[in-house]
Amino acid sequence: MLKLGVFELTDCGGCALNILFLYEKLFDLLEFYEIKEFHMASSIKEHDTLDVAIVTGSVSTQRDLNLLHYARNHSKYLIALGTCATHGDVQASVEGKIREKLEKVYGTRANPMKALDSTPIVQHVAVDYALPGCPYDKDEIYQVLMNLAKGVEPPTKDYPVCVECKLNEYECVLVKRGIPCLGPITLGGCNAVCIKSQLGCIGCRGPLPKEANPASEFEILKELGYDEEYIRRKFKTFARGELRW
């Protein structure tokens, strides 16, 4: 029986909750895993060496950083789950230093929460697997955990959302309707769920790590009449400005 721990840093709680939304598939996982820590599901904490640690959220406080290092030092495999963990997500896109903002509210040198500028966990520790998404596809984490339990290397995705759009034969909302869509430069894995609803991809899975062309996307959106500042903000909402043009 493998030992599993789920650790939550600063986030909305949805990534951890999404694991519980596996419903009957969660019982399949419990045939292979013994859960040693999972705050969303149980108050029990059994400090032990883990086979797999799942970490959600971004590093936004000293407590987050300490917990992250604990998870890394006590696990064989560490999975960064959700865009907060992989790219920093919305809270990491906030401009300016958090200390300066706290001082304006609480006074000079006030930092009661020991807050840090929000950063993804991949900036602090080595990560074995990164599964982005806000929210991520819960079947992805299920498959990764099942693969690890069976000694199979989990596959990684390296294609844009546009590939899934074409496979599903969805109409391109960017070309056909002029709706801002970051599908060409966003990592796939969501099955193009936003485009299915005739909405543009908002980039919640983070930028495509290779062969993305954000400069071209930037120019296309400009030609469609969108303001440069609007485009820049859209690019960095989930990716902390990692997309360059």
Image (tube, rainbow, N blue to C red):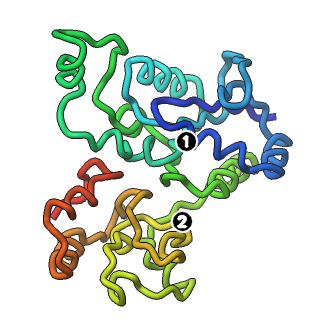
Position of residue 81 measured from the top left corner of the image (x, y, whole percent): 53, 44
Q: In the image, is residue 136 above or below residue 33?
A: below
Q: Which residue is mark 1?
A: 79
Residue plotted at (83% across, 51% down): 24
Element at label 1: strand
Q: Which residue is mark 2?
A: 190
Q: Amino acid at mark 1?
A: Ile
Position of residue 9 measured from the top left corner of the image (x, y, whole percent): 49, 29
Element at label 2: loop
Count of numbered tags: 2
Quote the CA–CA distance across marks 1 and 2.
18 Å
Residue plotted at (24% across, 51% down): 241
Along the horizontal axis of the image, is 117 left or right of 2?
left
Mark 1 vs 2, N-terminal side: 1
Position of residue 152 measured from the top left corner of the image (x, y, whole percent): 68, 54
Q: Amino acid at mark 2?
A: Cys
Q: Nearer the viewer, mark 1 or mark 2?
A: 2
Q: In the image, is residue 194 above or below residue 147?
A: below
Looking at the rendering, in which quadrant would you find the N terminus? top right
Graded by Cα atoms within 10 Å as few (under 14), some (14 to 19) or many (20 or more), the crowding at tag 2 reads many
Residue plotted at (30% across, 24% down): 116
